[in-house]
Amino acid sequence: MDKVEAGQPFWTPLKIIQWAVPFLGQKGIPHPRFDVETLIAHALGIDRLKVYLQFDRPLDAEELTRIREMLRRRSHFEPIQYITGLREFYGLPYKVSPAVLIPRPETELLVELAIGHLKTLPEEKRVVLDLGTGSGCIALSIAKNIACQIWALDISPRALEVARENAKNLKMESVQWREGDWFSALLPGDPQQFSLILSNPPYIALSEKDDLSPEVRDFEPFEALFSGEDGLSAYQYLADNLENRLLTGGLALFELQANRRDNICSLFSGTTWSQTLYPDLQGLPRVLKLNTK
């Protein structure tokens, strides 16, 4: 950002926008004005809409330095959520970092279905397992909205650090965090069966890596994105191990990728499961519900 040097006089939010929007646009950033306004607001500690009320505010050297660094990072396609360190999910603020997948609005359907199911159970039977918790957004959003017992697992210690920090920030200390690979992360004293198991597992095929946007491919954690050559490895593991982990009458909710719906559903076909697919706001199949018969 050569034209916005720290200490250079007369820079204002409006001048930054006028310079930076074409700058990011030339780099191929999809929504440059929104990003510039968001980064300016974050640097100044104000709401994005309030940037419009402060268009002519003189920016000091420290503010310019912060804005310049954030715009530099965005110009290299680093996700804006990692730059600000924040992402809203299910109406709650979550810290995010490159250690965790950025929560998507589509995943809120998983939370909504989970809460709806738990409301049908007496409180003492609301025993929940979140597999691959990442930032903890699924487990914490559920726990914030309904009384239940939740265990949340992740193989990444760095992801669990973020999840625990989110729990502290939200004053939600009831979730039990466990580090390890899938069900093996559970400790001997933990429940070994659950009334509800849910997950947003990795579901992108390694062969699809080059088709992803730079924001996803180059910055989000590999292990949270990719699931073998065909994108089905995580679901195959779940299909092989799920039955013994659900209580009688239990239910599982898994997010899935629409273009692999049939392959994923076939892994759970047979006499054990009753399957229901739920679409997202775009009408694409997003969540697979599995009931024990």
Image: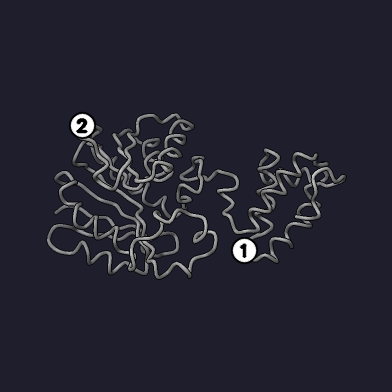
Question: Which residue occupies the extreme left position in the image?
Answer: 271
Where 115 falls versus 222 (above or below)?
above
Compared across the picture, whether 137 is left or right of 117 comes to right
Q: Which mark is residue 30?
A: 1
Compared across the picture, whether 292 is left or right of 211 comes to left
Three-letter amino acid code of the residue under disc 2: Gly
Q: Nearer the viewer, residue 292 or 20?
A: 20
In the rendered image, residue 226, in percent from the top left (x then y), is placed at 38, 60
Compared across the picture, whether 236 is left or right of 61 comes to left
In the rendered image, residue 230, in percent from the top left (x then y), is placed at 33, 68
Where 211 falls versus 106 (above or below)?
below
Where 235 falls versus 251 (above or below)?
below
Three-letter amino acid code of the residue under disc 1: Pro
**Residue shown at the point (24%, 45%) measured from the top left:** 183
**Residue shown at the point (42%, 35%) measured from the top left:** 164
Q: Secondary structure at mark 2?
A: loop
Identify the mark nearer the N-term, 2 or 1.
1
Dot in front, 2 or 1:
2
**Residue shown at the point (79%, 51%) measured from the top left:** 4
The answer to which image quadrant residue 56 occupies is top right
Around disc 2, counting alpha carbons within 10 Å, would you say few (fewer than 14), some (14 to 19), or many (20 or more)? few
Around disc 1, counting alpha carbons within 10 Å, would you say few (fewer than 14), some (14 to 19), or many (20 or more)? few
Quarter of the image for the C terminus: give it. Answer: bottom left
Circle 2 residue: 189
The answer to which image quadrant residue 140 occupies is top left
